[in-house]
Amino acid sequence: MNAELVFVGTELLLGEILNTNAQYLSQQLSLLGVDVYHQQVVGDNAARLRAVLTQALGRADLVIACGGLGPTDDDITREVAAEVAGRALKLDEGLLRGLEAWFATRGRKMTENNRRQCMVPEGAKVLPNDRGTAPGLIIPAPGGKEIVLLPGPPGELQPMFARHVVPYLTARNGGRPMRLVTRTLRFVGIGESALADGLKDLLAGQTDPTIAPYAKTAEVHLRLATRAADQAEGLARIAPVEAEIRARFGRFLYGTDDEDLAAAVGRLLADRGLTLATAESCTGGLVAKRITDVAGSSAYFRMGFVTYASEAKERFLGVPADLIAAHGVVSEPVALAMAQGALERAGADVAVAITGVAGPGGGTPETPVGTVCFGLAARGGAEDGRGAGALPGGAWTERLWLHGDREGVRERAAVHALAMVRRYLTGQLG
Amino acid sequence: MNAELVFVGTELLLGEILNTNAQYLSQQLSLLGVDVYHQQVVGDNAARLRAVLTQALGRADLVIACGGLGPTDDDITREVAAEVAGRALKLDEGLLRGLEAWFATRGRKMTENNRRQCMVPEGAKVLPNDRGTAPGLIIPAPGGKEIVLLPGPPGELQPMFARHVVPYLTARNGGRPMRLVTRTLRFVGIGESALADGLKDLLAGQTDPTIAPYAKTAEVHLRLATRAADQAEGLARIAPVEAEIRARFGRFLYGTDDEDLAAAVGRLLADRGLTLATAESCTGGLVAKRITDVAGSSAYFRMGFVTYASEAKERFLGVPADLIAAHGVVSEPVALAMAQGALERAGADVAVAITGVAGPGGGTPETPVGTVCFGLAARGGAEDGRGAGALPGGAWTERLWLHGDREGVRERAAVHALAMVRRYLTGQLG
């Protein structure tokens, strides 16, 4: 089965919104084994939409059109799709009563315009919208083809696709979709080219599973993929390749699939029964924010100090003023004093500190924009969680020159700080 | 002039990457007054790409194709575009020498494959790539049309478009593009429907400038737009409409155009010579991160406390343990004590505190997920910066029930905390 995606909305053509629906639907269809050869974007214009839908229906089994199902006059997708599929629209009394009830429970009066959202092409299947007023539709078209209409807001489109379109497509395919099974290996502390170089024999010889490297901000992901009848069969085919990659680069591999770096660090802390404190200058709370993105992080996250000003570093972390005067605020001794101050004052087991120049201003010849110093202090004594003995106490510093704009430097610095904590917790520091 | 955008890459069809180039180019072309009626995405397949480019060239003055200019075998855009435009490819000796030098300075050897990037269609203009090895091309096509080829990575595409394509398009249009002049008014503390209701006469009667409301996370933006010969003429047409909107809703209007809420709050603090501290629980550093997103925020941001655990609230902010026991950690008294503790300990003029249940766990019947309490403490005495007298000292609390998932609750809470600081600084609190 193959599908063509059509996105309807002048706001997309003007660049007012980012088309995240394109990525979401492409990913989902890929997982279902449905091929997509074309995506199109067209504005709220009936003649152009008619031409686009007609072309799409001519070359794909399934056309999925998103957006333009609202109640206002520029929402024309329902009418044009019905016309292209050759189906007359009729008022669906059940939908109308549901919509009237929806407005009534919110104490609002339904307008005449909303009735348009209750018009259904003959023979079409209605997809309930749990998050809004516009239902989706699956409209039969000549030649056994179909046009699926979905609402434009991602918060409505995604649950509707997952709950109603996926089961429909699975059933249409005899209940046995050929799934694309994937496994993502996530690395930090190694660049894409070094990783690719160390795996070049595997990358050159790849057929099944395929191996694709992706460079992320200060991380590299490897995606292993294969087509299989189900998840277990696919993972069994992926397992030996994953094992080989782990044997070569396991120390940089922090997590798999959806586990991000903050979650992986949190898991390591929780496994070892340790607590963490952060002391941030140039990242301004970003590391604490990443750590607390993870639900349940209060179990191991003790305290975050955002000491952006020098005086705050002295006052709240006990960094000596003469240390700052002697080495500069962006220096390894200051980073270390920040980490030690955070460790002591928060009563944590591990503390990481960051001080740097994120730019655009503030650079000097000695510490240009992008210079970031890191400090890590640890009490030590805890078991490493892998039965390899106790983690050492101590203090470590590092200095990096990070590229990118202000946001880029801050993002990379936050990743490096988390990676440094990971290296400590896995016995790779000192 | 109108343009059609074509994005080339199987990774887009698989949903592996988000098509941010589509939004960037659409926005830029809209600002230049170039209409875009269609966007297409196609994979690395010569036959399909040929068909897409031929169709695009048939209906648009200008086709901009992005991606597929790299050195590997699946990079076919250059060859297919030259064929569609009817131009033979020739090796450009100047490009070749440049590329050899690029590799030499990096101590790397150029591969035979890279020579493909030096092939130029006859009569085409070469666009230098300041960030990578693939040059862009403007290829003349029959009927006075053109195909512009740009590299896929946004870090290469964006500077190439801004530096080389924009001047070319401006010159092509006689140096006088009809610009779309826009003005964005940014509101916080009022919903989209309340704003639209209060402006319904303006929204109903709009012709020039047009007025479009956009709901953002806990904010609403109004975009006023008109076409004009230059910025000054456009803004003069927008000014009276903006004045009328300000007269009605000025107290919710925190900033214009690109100034986000954290920058607006920073500007108010700097104007008044005041400093800020933050004390965050459920937002985990997000408010501090937002404030320090703004370059120069060290002038007014004194300290951020990320006290995620109850014990940290007691230890670092002096919140009494019996207050937490009596009211619960998510309560207005605790939020207030956090703000007062941050104010005193940081020696700041204003402090804002947040404590809430972001979920997914942690909710109770009394404080369900989404419950967030805010506290604001201020020393008072500073002039309000508008000549309206001194700002009062004091303490304020608020409690909200925010919807959304963990990330949504945290985002909305951060916006509300910043908005609360803004209300204090503009004399709207207490």
Image: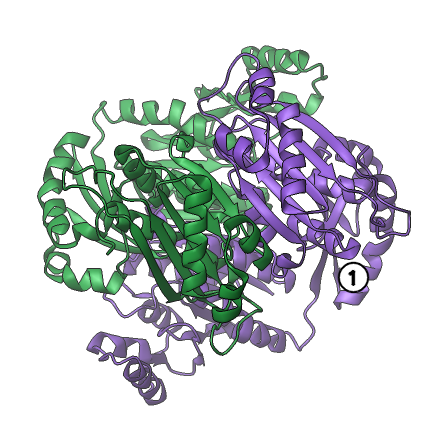
Chain colours: A purple, B green
- Vertical relation: A200 (above or below) A207: above
Q: Residue at x 46, y 37 (%)?
A: B65
- Residue B367 x, y percent position in the rendering: 47, 72
- Vertical relation: B156 (above or below) A62: above
Looking at this view, is A123 or A419 the one in front?
A: A419
- Quadrant, the N terminus of chain A: bottom right
Q: Residue at x 66, y 59 (%)?
A: A299
Q: Amino acid at mark 1?
A: Gly
Horizontal side of residue A123 vs A338, given as left or right: left
Horizontal side of residue B43 vs B430, given as left or right: right
- Quadrant, the C terminus of chain A: top right
Confirm whether residue B152 shows in the render. no
Q: Farthest right residue? A: A388
Q: Residue at x 64, y 52 (%)?
A: A301
- Residue A76 x, y percent position in the rendering: 30, 66
Looking at this view, is B295 or B317 the one in front?
A: B317
Chain letter for mark 1, please.
A
Looking at this view, is A354 or A324 the one in front?
A: A324
Q: Residues within 10 Å of mark 1 (few under 14, many from 20)?
A: many
Query: Circle 1 — which element?
Result: helix
- Residue A288 x, y percent position in the rendering: 57, 46
Confirm whether residue B370 shows in the render. yes
- Vertical relation: B267 (above or below) B379: above
Looking at this view, is B2 or B132 the one in front?
A: B132
Q: State the residue position of label 1.
A: A234
- Vertical relation: A308 (above or below) A209: above
